[in-house]
Each structure stands twice: as C-alpha cells, then as structure tokens.
Amino acid sequence: MKLAIVDPVGNPGGGSRYLGALVPHLLELRPDLKITFFGNSISIDRERLQTEWKEVKIKNLSSLWLSNRPFWNIPGAKQAIKLFQQRICSPLTWIPYFFSGSVHKELESKIKGFDLAFFPWPFFLTFPKLSCPSVAVFHDFNFKYYFSGQGFSPYNLDFLDREIPVWLKNCLPVVSTNFIRSELEKFYPDAVLKTKVIHLGPMGYSGGFLALPDRSAARLFLDRRGLPAEYILYPTNISPHKNLGPLYSAMYLLRQKGWKIPLILAGYGTENLSGRAHPLGMIRDLERKEILGLGYVSNEEIDALIQCARIVINTSLYEAGNGSGLDAWGKGVPVAMSDIPAFREHVEVQGVKAKLFDPRSPQSIADQLESILKDPDAAEKDAKASLEAISNWSWKRTAGLYLQTFEEAMKKHV
C-alpha cells in the first residue's frame, strides 16, 4: 500500500503524540507499507520527524511557507495573511503555492499514484480533490460550542461550518470514542453510519518516541530542570475548554487544608501561567510558584513528568478522550479527571480507574485530589489495576484497526 499522511497543522501535544504512536505501529504490522508524510515544517522540526521516522518520506508543504515566517508573530498578523491568501490569492491559479497558501491545491498536485490519503487532522483545510480515497480523523466538534474567553473567530467558524460537511461526505470518518461518534450523529447525522470508532491506548513510551526506562531515570531527567520532587500534573494548553480557572481555585482550597504540593502545567501557551493559587484563580508571581507553567516540552520530558507525578489531572469540559490520562494509566500513575462522557468512557469501556469530579466545582476537584493524597495505598492499588487494564489496548491493536479501515476505504472507492 502506498499511503499519504497529511497533517498541515501539526498540533503540539496530543495530536503529534498520536501520530508518533500510530505511524511506527503501522510499519511494524505492514513492513511493505510505503508512507509519505506531507506536513508543516515547523511541526516536522519540533517533533524531529526526520530522525523519528526513518522509514517515512517527509515532505514539507511549500504552501505553508509564507504563514510560517517568524515576522508574522505580531498579534493578528497570521490571521491577516491567511485571510489575504484565502480571499485574494487562492482563486488565482497561476500564483505559486508558497505565496497563495493553497494547501489543498498543492496536495492535489502532489498526491498522485497513492492508494489512500490519511488526514489525522482535517480541520481548517479545504477538501482536496484526489484520485485516491481519503480517511480522516475527526478529533472532536468543540467549535460547535462556546465555553468562555476567546473562542473561534467568525472567519474560522464559517470555514469549519462550510468545509466539515464536505469532508464527511467525501471521506471515511474515524473517531476515537463512542462519545465523539454521538456528537457526530448530533451535528452530521448523514455521516454517522459510515463512521468508525477506534479507541486509543497510551501515547507515550509505547509510541515511536524515545522512552525513559524507569521512574528513577525519569526523575534524574527532571532534576536537571530543578523541578519539585512531588507535584500534581496537568498536561494542557490555554484553550477555554481546558477549564484552568476552577483548578487554580481547587489548589487554593488544598493549600488551606495544609497540602503544599504544587501544580505543574505543561503544554502550548502555559509558559506564562506561574504564580499563587487564589480563590478567584491565580495571582501571577514568579517568586512564589505554587503553580508552575512550563510551556511546551519535549516528548521525553512530558513522559518523565507523567511518570513521576503524584497525580495526573484533567479538568477539561469537552474532549474526545483523556490523552494524558491514557499515558498516566499506562505508567501506573493515579488519575483525577472531569466527570464528562468522553472521560467516563475510559472507565466503562477500557476498565481503568480514576477519581471523577465536577469540573465546574473547585470544591469537588479539591476533594478528589485530597482523597488520592490522603490514601496513597488505595491510589496505588487503583493505578496498578488501571495499568493492567490499559495493557489490553495496545497501539499494535489500534494500528491494525486503522489498516482495516484503510483497506475498507480502498475497496469502497473501487
């Protein structure tokens, strides 16, 4: 099979770790598989794909060149250049891809002679007209909701509302939980019958990335950054649905009861989130860091952070699933998480254990964190049971289901 994998965005965090786990296992199951990856040069360099994926041809998309220029870091500049490309340049077929930013047209010119095109993140991309079938993963539909703060721009909402139905009509959709399948049915009922549900396993050490062999090695790795010996970890970003405010207040409540354990945040945009816990949220304070924001870290470092955490927490309001929870269960680390449908599905379908809380209630979050801290023996027992349960959900199994889906798409296309 000649497979094109296309990811023009290259999301930092879970999106990249997902591909980092999937691609090596596809090749393990099908050594004859010929993969070409079309991606964003920024994410390709960030994730060291040239080194990680030695058996994969890596191709930078030239249509992303202009929007990737560092001088567009001025607030609003990137959005402005994208609007210019979409409205002025895109209709002009003679303009070079690096200037027009027409990713879909570049793909149409380059994805030829492939058996299938796989899109792990089809959002914000016009559906390209290809001669081969397409499979696309619809991570979630959070653009259908408004949570708080700065949401999607009107332009982005219009784009998604216009293009997602086109994608669902012309590709074979994949989702990672039954919950997201139900969301797809809610918003796009015509596509639900052909949608495939493929649950995921831990995305850290079992993926293609370098693994740290044990907890002591991971601890030494963290000591070089001067990180605390004990901490609660939230691998996250600054999107509104990640729901950081109630967690800050929960940490304040914990400290009022004598628990001095800090909270570490790791992920895109968190580098500016350090300070003191407060009933209203967080007071920015670079001296007294009860909350420590690390920003985006390497795959090795996030694996080490998860492996050495006292608790891995996820307070999100809406997700396809708990990616950091999967990694924590895969390392035998206690998990506390929002009582939302996608997270409960891990417990009900995959058999893992976690403390569930009301994500809107700082008191509920603090109570469940304290229950783990007060009874470490029970927490360790639950963590070991979760490690055993999640071992049945390997990436070899997941990759096999993806290969079956690819084969089905090709048969239907013929």
Image (cartoon, rainbow, N blue to C red):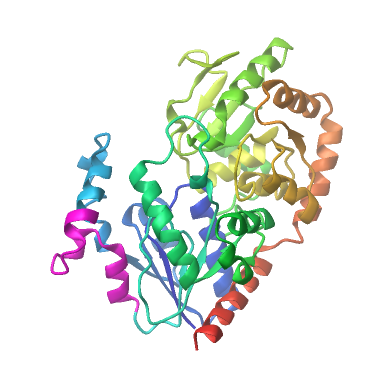
* Residue, far bottom: 414
Q: Is 323 a magenta residue?
A: no
Quadrant in the rendering for residue 200:
bottom right
Q: Nearer the viewer, residue 166 or 398?
A: 166
Q: Which segment did they paint magenta? A: 86-111
Q: Position of residue 395 (x, y in %)?
A: 65, 64
* Number of numbered labels in the structure image: 0
Please name the residue shown 37% across and 59% down the image.
125
- Indicate left or right for 160 with 362 as reference: left
Is the stretch drawn in magenta largely helix, strand or loop?
helix
Please name the residue shown 66% across and 35% down the image.
313
- Indicate left or right for 392 with 80 as reference: right
Please name the residue shown 17% across and 58% down the image.
89
Please name the residue shown 55% across and 60% down the image.
188
Q: Nearer the viewer, residue 63 or 296?
A: 63
Q: Position of residue 343 (x, y in %)?
A: 70, 45
